[in-house]
Amino acid sequence: MYVLDAKSKTPLHIQLYKAIKEDIIVNYKVGDKLPSIRKVATLYNLSKNTVESAYAQLYAEGYVESRAKSGYYVCELFFNSFRAEKETETTSNTIPKAYRYDFFPAQLHKEDFPLKTWKRLYNRVVTGEVDFGSYPDGQGELVLREQIAAYLRSSRGVVCSAEHIIITNGFIGAMELIAKLLKERYSDFAQEMPGYHIARKIFDAYGYTIHPVGVDAQGLKIEELKKTQAHIVYITPSHQYPTGVAMPIARRQQLIAHMQRISGVIIEDDYDSELAYYTRPIPSLQGLDGGSCVVYLGTFAKALSPAVRVGYMVVPEWIHTLYKESYDSHFSSVSITTQLTLAAFMQEGHWERHLRRIRTLNKKKHNAMKEAIVTHLGNSCKIIAEGGGLSLLIVPTKEGFSWQKLQVLAEQEGIVIYLAKERSGTAFEALRMGFGGFRLEEIDEAVRAFAKVWFMAYLA
């Protein structure tokens, strides 16, 4: 079995290519047949395009040959050089490949983090405010929960108090906790598709039956949801992942009415609501519901730092009761120093000032990315999602475009790209053009370099 990390910055097709290449070097013989693309895609829960790209790279480098209507086989031509290559790899330090441009769609530039202020607050907390002789509050430090509650009430219309907020170490920690708490009551989980693949994988790992539900121009299809047995539904209503659509008030009310009627639970992931550039975000589902059936998830990853690893969820009273009765409530999943530093950061007004600055900066980056796409890609593509978050979504407008060829060419040119289907499933495919990790002045140059690869991906 190959070990593939969906959270790694290295694209999945590159990880798979390297793993198969290593397997060929160590274990395969000349003429051995590789598993079919369909089999590998099913075994590792990957898209067919991802596996095809990995095989295409192996083919391009001469490790395998393709036989019509038969599959891929290990080549004889280069086999004698495999052992020497293996020895070289094991006797020298492996140096990660340096990429020219990385269009990661959920990244901030390291210079955007308020490091000077954070260090000052952290040093103050460590030297004077932390009781290193006691256990921290498993639910999260009260001062931080109070600051988050005040922020959510004013910015997102969330109905909450510190009592109903649980601090987590990010999205995965929050979803795993929900899956555990609700397991004895529910067995069926629905998710918008296309949608964030990690949500589905977590609930699948806990034994839930998964129900994919389609998305249209107004978000999750409520009538399709009603046809399932799901009593839990996960959605990203303010900025649907990955299509970018926002669920209007009328449909939000329909969803709440349905889930209240069946005594179900809505998991509302408001993952990048702070980064809306054209309009104010629609008020939260949780605020419309009043906190009876909605679990509200948020994180500081998109607007402050993914490295800080702080998330939170607002839960209804009955779920809070389940939480207090579980062993999870006894142990904090986030360092107390991180929590108290973040609390001071919010309490002294730095969070609001940082948000204004980061919103302004990323709006400029967003507009620069859009302008560069229009300038360098022209009518060869269409922007299908914009106006929020840290990326734009584009699709080709002309026939004969190969996503597989784009991946291979981009890798050869030292450009890291991210396809929507790798993280969201279904047949929906688009390219996520991340801008947050660039300096403003770097964006045009990066898109210009990418454009050469984009146009080469159109088949002759």
Image: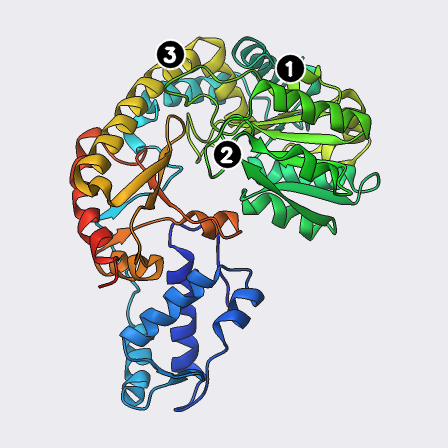
Residue 251 position, x and y percent, is 62, 24
Q: Give the mark nearer the N terminus: 1 vs 3.
A: 1
Could you say which quadrant of the image residue 303 lies in? top left
Could you tell me how far apart the alpha carbons at marks 3 and 2 are, in whole angstroms? 20 Å
Q: Secondary structure at mark 3?
A: helix
Could you tell me how far apart the alpha carbons at marks 1 and 2 are, in whole angstroms? 25 Å
The C terminus - image quarter: bottom left
Q: How many marks?
A: 3
Mark 1 = which residue?
287
Please state which of residues 324 and 331 is positioned toward the viewer in this rendering: 324
- Residue in the picture at 66% in, 13% down: 159
Residue 400 position, x and y percent, is 30, 58
Could you say which quadrant of the image residue 85 lies in? bottom left
Mark 2 = which residue?
309
Please state which of residues 48 and 362 is positioned toward the viewer in this rendering: 48
Q: Give the mark nearer the N terminus: 1 vs 2.
A: 1
Q: Which numbered dot is residue 353?
A: 3
Q: Secondary structure at mark 2?
A: loop
Q: Give the mark nearer the N terminus: 3 vs 2.
A: 2
Q: Is residue 4 left or right of residue 411?
A: right
Could you tell me how far apart the alpha carbons at marks 1 and 3 are, in whole angstroms? 25 Å
